[in-house]
Image (tube, helix red, strand yellow):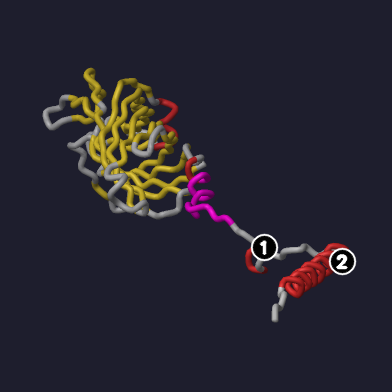
Amino acid sequence: MKINIFPSMRWSLASLFLVSTVSLSQDFFAGKPAFSPAQNDTNIVFESPNKNFASSAKTSSLLDAWGLDILISNNGFGLGGFYRHQYTNELFGTVTFAISDAKDDNEVEYVTYYGQTIVPGKINRFLLIPLDFGMQYRLFADDILDNFRPYINGAIGPTLVFASPYEREFFNSLGYGQAHYTVGGYIGFGAFFGSDKESLSGINIRYYFVPFKKGIDSMVNGYGGIDTKKDFGGFFITLNFGSVF
């Protein structure tokens, strides 16, 4: 006996096709997609491999800085200011201005019974006012963390030496003083501290070169003559406080 299975297979395939078509049609008219992707594939979030990109972009725009200098030396205290511009990661241009005391090396101070300080034989007080233009070079930029940034620096510029008569009271003597001009400069080394890129705080040790060939009357010496001061330089410790913008 011969059995033909092909008609039954054809009916099975036709039924499967019909059921699939009806199901897809119902989904289509119901507003559902025929094939839904996996639920956790619907949201894809792309992240930058450099998570500090925004911070780096902000930091790269902070190229200028200005602030206050406090100067300390054997001559006393001084105040000043600075402006700095960044050219590269290591190289900066600087402008510094300061006002400080300058004394003769032979001065000897005495305190009177009434608490007054006097210097026998002193002729003039001196104020040193340099305006210097220079460069600052950061050391080990790729080897040391940013919270400690050592550097070397140097500058040159016009310097005013103001001499006023010691025999008069300080503020009163300013009206009788005389300005003298020369060219000076300094070399130094220092470091900035802290990881805050928007502020500066550090220390700089400088040696100022301020020659004055003519000399300015300074002291009456032990032989009754007058000694002149021809060098107004020296070591200064400078404390820096500023902001970056």
Tell me where the magenta segment starts and ends, as one range: 46-58
In the image, residue 235 lies in the stretch drawn in magenta? no
Q: Between disc 2 and disc 1, whose residue precedes?
A: 2
Q: Residue 71: which disc? A: none
Is any part of residue 237 visible from this angle? Answer: no
Amino acid carrying label 2: it is Ala
Camera-side residue: 83 or 19? 19
| Viewer-side residue, 182 vs 187 | 187
Q: Position of residue 147 (x, y in %)?
A: 36, 54
Q: Residue at x 63, y 68 (%)?
A: 40
Where is the N terminus found, in terms of image quarters? Answer: bottom right
Residue depicted at x 48% and y 53%: 49
| Image x and y of residue 173, in percent | 40, 31
Q: Residue furthest left?
A: 223
Residue to which mark 1 is pinned: 42
Q: Quadrant of residue 121?
A: top left
Mark 2 falls on what kind of element?
A: loop
Which quarter of the figure has residue 229?
Answer: top left
Q: CA distance from mark 2 to mark 1?
A: 21 Å
Q: Residue furthest front?
A: 1
Neighbor class of circle 2 (other Cα within 10 Å; few <14, some 14-19, many 20+) is: few
Tell me if residue 48 is in the magenta stretch: yes
Disc number placed over residue 30 in the picture, else none: 2
Percent coordinates x, y for residue 227 in the rendering: 18, 26
